Image: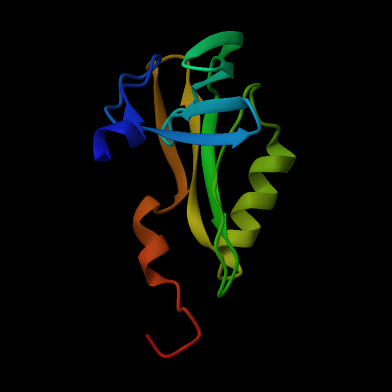
């Protein structure tokens, strides 16, 4: 169901923090990441028969988020869990200037919210699939 793909961010309160899941054998994981501020929650579960046991859980404060889509490619969302250095910010800006799609946000302590530094979260729709579509 679409509601199973997002939940409210625990930091900036954005309604659509993304949920990614993985499963291998009797173990599964669930990662919730806010594409705005970078807040992340991670859980691992072990299933035995009809019950599931939470075996690991952590939550990380976000210091920003970014998405980089190389020309003709695809990628996921990424979060900063420590303040990004000027070098990292400069490198991401350089890739965006070179034609990569995506965006970059950083957490503004003074305002208590993330601010967009570069790119656009909606540019992912500008990527060509390479087959003329």
What residue is shown at x 63% (from left), y 51% (from top)? 92
Quarter containing the N terminus: top left
Q: Is residue 72 left or right of residue 4?
A: right
Q: Pick whichever, 93 or 61, lies toward us.
A: 61
- x, y percent for residue 45: 57, 17
Question: Residue 114, located in which quarter of the rendered image?
Answer: top left
- x, y percent for residue 71: 58, 73
How many numbered marks appear?
A: 0
- x, y percent for residue 37: 45, 28
- x, y percent for residue 49: 53, 17
Q: Pick whichever, 131 or 122, lies toward us.
A: 131
Q: How is the image coloured?
A: rainbow
What residue is shown at x 64% (from left), y 42% (from top)? 89
Above-or-below relation of 98 to 109: below
Tell which residue pokes out farthest to the front in this image.
49
Q: Is residue 17 left or right of residue 71?
A: left
What residue is shown at x 26% (from left), y 40% (from top)? 2
Question: Residue 19, located in which quarter of the rendered image?
Answer: top left
Tell which residue pokes out farthest to the right in this image.
87
Tell which residue pokes out farthest to the bottom in this image.
132
Q: Pick whichever, 78 or 101, lies toward us.
A: 78
Q: Is residue 116 left or right of residue 92?
A: left
Above-or-below relation of 20 to 102: above
What residue is shown at x 61% (from left), y 69% (from top)? 98
Quarter containing the C terminus: bottom left
Question: Residue 119, located in which quarter of the rendered image?
Answer: bottom left
């Amino acid at each position: 169901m679409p509601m199973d793909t997002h939940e409210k961010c625990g930091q900036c309160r954005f309604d659509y923090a993304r949920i990614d899941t993985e499963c291998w054998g009797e173990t599964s994981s669930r990662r919730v990441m806010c594409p705005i501020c970078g807040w992340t929650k991670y859980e691992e579960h072990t299933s035995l028969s009809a019950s599931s046991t939470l075996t690991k859980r952590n939550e990380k404060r976000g210091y920003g988020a970014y998405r980089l889509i190389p020309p003709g490619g695809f990628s996921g969302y990424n979060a900063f869990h420590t303040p990004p250095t000027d070098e990292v910010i400069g490198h991401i800006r350089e890739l965006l200037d070179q034609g990569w799609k995506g965006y970059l946000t950083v957490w503004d302590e003074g305002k208590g919210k993330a601010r967009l530094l570069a790119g656009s979260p909606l540019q992912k729709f500008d990527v060509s699939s390479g087959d003329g579509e």
